[in-house]
Structures are given as C-alpha cells and as structure tokens.
Amino acid sequence: MAMQTVTQNKSHGGTQGVYRHPSRETKTDMTFSVFVPDHAADAKLPVVTYLSGLTCTHANVTEKGEFRQACAELGLIFVAPDTSPRGEGVPGDPANAYDFGLGAGFYVDATEQPFATNYRMWSYVTEELPKLIAEQFPVDTARQSILGHSMGGHGALTVALRYPDRYRAASAFAPIVAPSQVPWGNKALGGYLGSNKPAWRKHDAVALIEDGARFSDLLVDYGDADGFLTEQLRPELLKAACEKANIPLTLRRQPGYDHSYYFISTFMADHLRWHAARLTA
Amino acid sequence: MAMQTVTQNKSHGGTQGVYRHPSRETKTDMTFSVFVPDHAADAKLPVVTYLSGLTCTHANVTEKGEFRQACAELGLIFVAPDTSPRGEGVPGDPANAYDFGLGAGFYVDATEQPFATNYRMWSYVTEELPKLIAEQFPVDTARQSILGHSMGGHGALTVALRYPDRYRAASAFAPIVAPSQVPWGNKALGGYLGSNKPAWRKHDAVALIEDGARFSDLLVDYGDADGFLTEQLRPELLKAACEKANIPLTLRRQPGYDHSYYFISTFMADHLRWHAARLTA
C-alpha cells in the first residue's frame, strides 16, 4: 500500500497533509487529508476521523472545517477521507444526481452491480484506511473516535454503533439518522444493497439501536434552519431510539443554523473537546 | 447604490453574508462579504477590512480565513471585497496571466488604457465600499482598521499610510512591501499607471514611508517557507524603511509557514486581537 504525499502545509503549529494511495477496497486511488499537530518526537496521539457529506471530498472540511486550532490545542490527529471512489471506470448515478454514486458512497459495501466492485466505503473507512493511518502517522490506535456531517454523520453513527469498543467517542453534525425511512437513504441503500432489508438495518443508526447496538454516549448538533431537517435528517427518530435503549444522547437544536460548513465550523471545536475528554480519560 | 444579498448564513453566532452591488467606480457589479457578529440592537461595531491577494475573490478568506470565531469574541465586523473588477467587457491580461488584470487589481486607480475605465480599486476600497458599508451595516466609522495578504497586504499598508487618521490599525500577512522594486509590482504598476513614477510611489509602502507617510504602528507576519519571499515580498525593505522613519513595526518571521491560507488562518486571530486592542482603546 504505497502512499504518496500530495501536499503538506504548516498550519496552527502542525502539518496539514493531503495524501493519495491505491485502495485495495475501492480499486481506485483514494485521496484523504490528515492534520498532525505539533507533538513530542515519540508521542502517539489520539485520532479523530471525520466523514463528510454528499458531494464532498476530503477538501471541504480541510479548507472550511476550522478544526486545526482545536486539534492543535487538544493534541488530536484529524483524518478526513473522501466520500466515494472516483476515477475512470467508476460508475456513477446514471442521471448524474448529487445524492447517489460519485460523492455519495453512503459508507456501505455495495452488493449491487455495477457498484459492488468499487463502492466499498464501509470496509475502506473501518479497515483499510485506519490500518494505513496507523502505519504512516503517530497514532495511538487505542484512542480513536469518529464524527461526521449529514451522510457522514450517518457514517459516523453507524460505524460507532457497530464498533463501540474501537471508538471512544462519536458525534455528528446534522446526521441522517434513519436512512431506511428517508428519500436519500432509500435511494442509496436500495441502489447499493438492493432489496436486502436486513443489510439496510446494519447501515441505519436507528435500526441498529432497535436491533441492540449500543454506544457509551452520543453528541448531535443540528440547525433549525437546515432545509433537509424534516425530510432527510429527522433527529427525533434518533432521540426516540436512544431514549428507549438508554443511550445518553446530547441532542442540540441550534437556532438559525443551516446545513453548511458555516454551521459545522461554528460547533467543530465543541465537538473536538467532547471527543478529547473521552479520548484522554 | 442598490445592494442585493447573495447569501446569508448564520455562523459563530453572527451572520456571514455575501452581497453584490453595481459599482460607480468599476462600472461593474462588485461582490463582497461581510461578517457581522451578534450584537446589541443599537450597537455600532468597529469594522476591519481585509484585502485579498492575487487570483482571489471575497470567497477565499470567507471560506478559509478562520476569522469568524475571533470576530465574534472581539465584536468586529469583517469586510472582504473582491480584488478586481470582473464581468463582460472588463479587460484582463492579454496572456491570461494570474498576476495582472482579472483578480489582480493591485488596489490602484489605473490611468492606462484599456484598464482606466474599470480598474479603480483604490477609489473602490477607500471611498465607495466604506460608504456603502457604513450605510448598510451597524458600523462605527470612527473605528476602522485594515489588513491584507500578499497583494492585499500591499493594499492594506498603502491605504493605511495614506489615511492614517481613518484607520486605527493596520497589519499584513506576507505583503508586497515595495512593488516598485519587485517583478509583480513592476508589471502591475507599469500596466495600470504607465511610466508615471511619482504615481507609483503613492502605491508603494516603502516609497510612501520614504516620502514622509507615517502610521502609529504596524504588524506583519511572513513565513520563511514562502516561495515568494525573497523575490516578491522582501519584508527587509519595510523593516529598513520603518526603522529609518521611526515607525514601530512588529515583523514576525514564522518558521515553516508558506504563502497559503494555512498560514493566514493560523495567525488571523492574533491579527484581529491586535486590531481590536487599537479599535477599542
């Protein structure tokens, strides 16, 4: 697994890098970013993985996420993968829709053709990428956490619920919490997983909780001016599921905020402090 | 001067807006961004104007500048104009170079054709835009300051040196300090102002100081990994001029930093605190 450095820039005392490697899972080159704060030569740092939303690459949060100051203060490595495979020969949505195919991998391993070959984002973000990060960066693999936005919030919640012993903290900005019950999720899970409804439930945070998955506690922020709130996100479904399952959920309605990085960047430092408290406990 | 709202997003408790208006000076529509922090209904806030570098629009600093948290804490309005006129009929560089014409107005009023009609960025940023901002936003016009990056650092320094009574603070990231002595500046000032060397001196911070312009004190940061440092920026020329003129200059060499927004965003909050101390004194 050869990894090449695309760019490295000093920022907030650390190094913001962008890297590329040929992925075994997606059978494409995958690009991701890593911020490593200033640290002692022999230190191993906790690592936070951020999963992005529809249409995004690693670049959106890297440029607009305003995470570096907090990561520098808290001593956190911040990893941001792409949201889907890309490149020649990778099938996308036949109509070039923004919510399926390229930029919209939904963090599942597709079983349907023509997507099954490349769309293996679940295995990529839970297996291949963490292994590469552990090999290449000064990471303490016993201290990992995950967060994400929108489709990436869905990814973060489902990953955390299925690997509660690996991730010490999980949070989300405006996540899709129940893809089986909303249009974006129906389209994506149907397209990637077909009619196999038990497979859908493993990629649906609310269904996972109903089926017995648990996590120590969760933090979710959403804006009440988010245009996707009532049709696609539906945080009330996560609230109900967590209450029934006795999962402590800090669910914050942020008045006036929308779905953009202007919202995410406002609360990014808050989330990283939440993660740091659990990663360094 | 009708101003239209392009976008408004809540961020860090305030409003990040993008606006457009037909400019009397440039005879084009001009787009700019303004961040207004949360404030009391009848408050008038100090205003910081940020001038961007080559190739940039308002969008670069708005997305990547990491200024909103500090502006929210310090109670500063942050204004970011475009760097040149744009649109149908606006002449650019004949060879589409990045360092002249579109995206490279250099904050001068051009006297050479075909640029003289539209390239009036000096009058735009010192007269037309401040007046519009004062009309449309809750600004205390007695408390203004200015900063900028690279070509915009050149703009900020020259504006401050020519209006020392209007701007209470001025600072720059990696500024062009002596355009008459470097390739970028020679090309731009020659193209916009022709061979009129006295006019050049009014758009050259070092020459302005040599000719008697003064400012209370200045803050300049640059990175020693900045690829433009020795040929285009030459901060040592500003240091020598300020020493000779007894202008207090805080000139900081930041090890390992380059010319990018990864550098700017690292020290943005520092600069805004410097401005706030002088704006609220």
Image (cartoon, coloured by chain):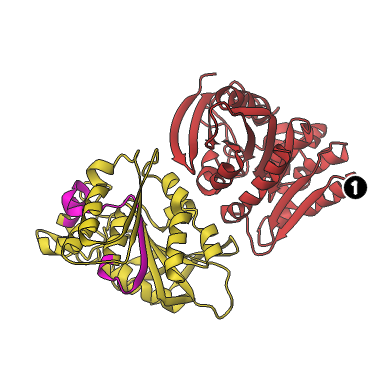
Chain colours: A red, B yellow
Report x, y in % for residue B186: 16, 51
- Mark 1 falls on what kind of element? helix
Residue placed under numbered mark 1 in the picture: A244
Mark 1 crowd level (few <14, some 14–19, many ≥20, 10 Å Cα)? few
Q: Is residue B253 magenta?
A: no
| Span shown in magenta | B161-189
Residue displayed at 83% across by 32% down: A198
Decide if residue B239 is on the left or right side of residue A236. Answer: left
| Residue B27 visible in the snapshot | no
* Residue nearest the observer in this picture, B146 or B188: B146
Residue displayed at 48% across by 36% down: A15
Q: Amino acid at mark 1?
A: Lys
Residue displayed at 33% across by 41% down: B226
Report x, y in % for residue B80: 41, 62
Disc 1 is attached to a residue of which chain? A
Report x, y in % for residue A146: 68, 38
